[in-house]
Amino acid sequence: MEKKTISRDGTPIAYEVSGEGPAVIFVTGAMATGASDAPLASLLSDRFSAVVYDRRGRGESGDTEPFAVAREVEDIAALIEATGDGNAALYGMSSGAALALEAAASGLPIGKVAVYEPPFAVYEGGEKQRAEYTERLTQLLAQGRRGDAVELFIALTGAPPEVIRGMRHSAVWPALEAVAPTLAYDNAVMGDGLVPRKRLASVPVPVLALAGGASPEWMRESARATAEAAPDGTYRVLDGQTHMVDPGVLAPALAEFFAG
């Protein structure tokens, strides 16, 4: 990351900007740094100032205890001040979608919010699963068992045991363990795991909720419910896409929404 801005609590937040035009800030999901959004940002940089950043506790950004979701909202506020002309649009991926929506509901100067597959629970049993995950994650992190915490999260996403075993022996595993403590941050952002309908009802700007046509049905329903709960929400499915969405397919949908 080339630049840093200082959040309200003194935490340095690392970011990069590519292109010129209205600012769009990319909010990553769990286990990711700003580098993961770079391919998508580059596809939008011909029309927008695409801002990628390392969320606190990741990459080149700092971290300050105690954590609160409000601190991550303040990080976005600092980025808007540093990169926007008084306001910005947000794009949030997965749990980063929940953070982007919370930032908009908090009254930051945000013009539009696009999200891809916010992982809210929409079916019976989802709330219980979230509570069990929270309890186990808290235990593992308190014991310093970062690798087991990462494994717990990956299992929650539906990855089979053999895939997880392979990942534990891969070159990327140390980087995943390095950001394992931030799994608690994303978990806090998700709240009780249910669609935050009352909070979404207070989002004062247009919301585009996207999902992949090849993703599990519950992910599409979560995106649909998010759009329906927002006063000015739109739901759209990207045919053939999964949670690992192709930037080349996603970018035109975002460009149309942000420029429209």
Image (spheres, helix red, strand yellow):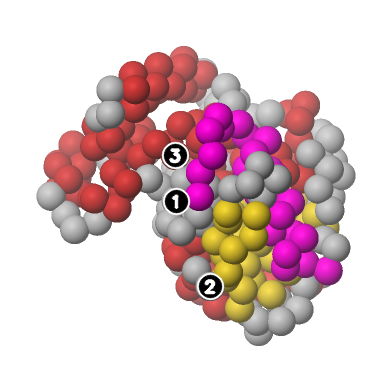
Q: Which mark is residue 182?
A: 3
Q: Magenta span has 117? A: no
Left or right of residue 212, residue 144 in this image: left
Of residues 175 and 128, the one drawn nearer to the viewer in this rendering: 175
Q: Amino acid at mark 1?
A: Arg
Q: Which residues are magenta?
A: 62-85
Mark 3: give few (<14), some (14-19) or many (20+) Cα within 10 Å: many
The residue that appears at 59% across and 63% down in the rendered structure is 4
Q: Amino acid at mark 3?
A: Thr
Q: Label 2, on which residue?
A: 2
Q: Which mark is residue 58?
A: 1
The residue that appears at 83% across and 43% down in the rendered structure is 107
The reply to whether dot 1 and dot 3 touch (C-beta < 8 Å) is yes
Q: Earlier in the sequence, mark 1 or mark 3?
A: 1
Residue 176 lies, with reference to residue 143, above or below; the image says below
The reply to whether dot 1 and dot 2 touch (C-beta < 8 Å) is no
Main secondary-structure element of the magenta-colored stretch: helix
Q: Amino acid at mark 2?
A: Glu
- The CA span between labels 1 and 2 is 15 Å
